[in-house]
Image (cartoon, rainbow, N blue to C red):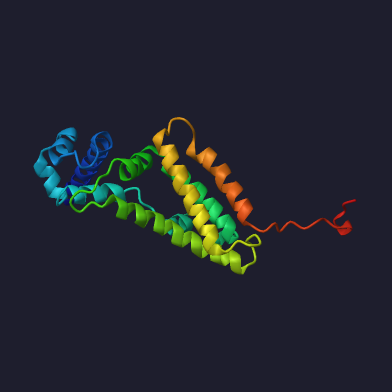
Amino acid sequence: MARKTKADAEATREALLDAAEDIFFEKGVARTTLEQIARHAGMTRGAVYWHFKNKADLFHAMSDRVHLPFEELTRELDAPQQGHTPIETIRLTLRHALMRIEQPRHRRVLSIILHRCEFFSDINPLQMQHRMANDCYRSMLRHFEMAERAGQLAPGVDATRAAQMMEYTIGGMLHDWLRTPEEYSLTERGRGIIDSLLDLLSRDTAEPSSPADGSA
């Protein structure tokens, strides 16, 4: 019986988070009330307060459902354990991240944080955006530093500059895509942009073939 009660409570909580996502996306965070969220979920406002202290608590719980830092994405791929170079780890992780962002829930929540969230109570959208960008930047910087130590970066490119260029590219790409996400696939276009930038940042390690390779 207790197990069913716990499952029911979790289902109620998820329904409220779904409703919050819908209303926040439609109206913006500041203009949304807990009453509207409860009504959209087919519940009372008391049910909201049973699970969440206030709107800010509900908002952060909604955001946490999709927030997955760069390092966790990297570990999820097991890229370092598969023998990939640091550059390839960055490439694979960013491709994976774009695929996640293009999923409906991730897209909607990211759009709420970037475009439909105002300063309100304990909600600071700029702080959240900075934290998300900083998570990604610090992780990419660590991998670019490994690439620099291994001599894998192009001449004149250091790890800091490489991480900054990639951060600015990804950030600009996300903001552009979120304005009209139906116009093109972020995964497909983003993959080409990421590949092109990483190729520019990386040292060309290809060596000319020799007669021993059987070439003319």
Task: Give the image quarter of residue 138.
Answer: bottom left
In this orientation, does residue 1 appear?
Answer: no
Residue at 31% across / 48% down in the picture? 65
**On screen, 62 above or below 136?**
above
Q: Residue furthest front?
A: 156
Horizontal side of residue 102 vs 211, given as left or right? left
In this orientation, does residue 36 appear?
Answer: yes
Residue at 23% across / 48% down in the picture? 119
Q: Residue furthest bottom?
A: 149
Q: Position of residue 140 (x, y in %)?
A: 49, 59
Horizontal side of residue 90 vs 215, given as left or right? left
Task: Give the image quarter of residue 158.
Answer: bottom right
Count of labels in the image? 0
Residue at 17% across / 51% down in the picture? 121
Horizontal side of residue 89 vs 100, given as left or right? right
Q: Position of residue 113 (x, y in %)?
A: 31, 45
**Residue closest to the eye, 206 or 44:** 206
**On screen, 188 above or below 131?**
above
Q: Position of residue 111 (x, y in %)?
A: 34, 41
Task: Give the image quarter of residue 82.
Answer: bottom right
